[in-house]
Amino acid sequence: MMVIEVQKQIEVQTRPIISFNIEIHHHTIFVVRIWNNGSSPAVNLKLSIDKDFYRFGEIKGESKNIADMYIFKNILPTLAPRDGFWIDLCTGPEVGKELNGKIITPDKFTIEASYSYGERKYTEHFAVDLRAYFYTSGQKRIPEQLEKIAKSLDQLAKSKQL
């Protein structure tokens, strides 16, 4: 019994774990983050989304449907630990956008990841409800803060030159 528990603990510590979350960038853009939060590569990663979702509510030109992205249409041979993807979805006002009777930026959808490690196969599900993030601002990102600091320094340098 003890050996089985130790084996389970080792598996949890060494296996890949595909994780998902919603981030808010630039205070308005919903972004889904998909990454390998484990310590081993995820092998034969297959991502799927249960609904069409057109980025920023745009349907013209090159397909903006997330379901048509390479990472959702193909099996990825491997996703390294601490590697992943950020996918811009839309801004808050675009959530639930309808076109010709079809919702093109649904407020609820599910992303699934299937992958393997050794002989084991794993499947993770991420049920998204964008409404939960309404009226939130997200955390401030370091690059955004550095950008603000750089602008402030530029303005300060210009004011000293006058």
Image (cartoon, rainbow, N blue to C red):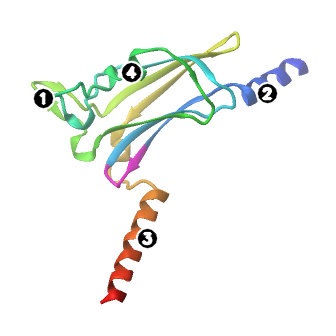
Among numbered discs 1 and 3, the one appearing first in the sequence: 1
Kindly give the residue lying farthest to the top in the view shown.
119
Picture coordinates of residue 37, whole percent (x, y): 61, 34
The residue that label 4 is drawn on is: 70
- Residue pictured at 33% horizontal, 86% vertical: 159
Residue 4 vs 14, above or below: the answer is above
The residue that label 3 is drawn on is: 149
Kindly give the residue lying farthest to the left in the view shown.
100
Which of discs 2 and 3 lies nearer the camera? The answer is: 3
Describe the element under mark 3 as helix, strand or loop. Answer: helix
Circle 4: residue type: Tyr
Which of discs 1 and 3 lies nearer the camera? The answer is: 3
Among numbered discs 4 and 2, the one appearing first in the sequence: 2
Among numbered discs 2 and 1, the one appearing first in the sequence: 2
Picture coordinates of residue 148, whole percent (x, y): 39, 67
Among numbered discs 1 and 4, the one appearing first in the sequence: 4
- 27 part of magenta stretch: yes
Circle 3: residue type: Ile
The residue that label 1 is drawn on is: 99
Kindly give the residue lying farthest to the right in the view shown.
2
Q: Is residue 153 left or right of residue 38?
A: left
* Pointer 1 local density, CA inside 10 Å: few below 14, some 14–19, many at least 20: few
Among numbered discs 3 and 4, the one appearing first in the sequence: 4
Quadrant of the frame with the N terminus: top right
Query: Are the residues at dot 2 and dot 3 in contact (C-beta closer than 8 Å)?
Result: no
The residue that label 2 is drawn on is: 9
Picture coordinates of residue 26, whole percent (x, y): 35, 54
User: Which residues are the magenta region?
Assistant: 23-28
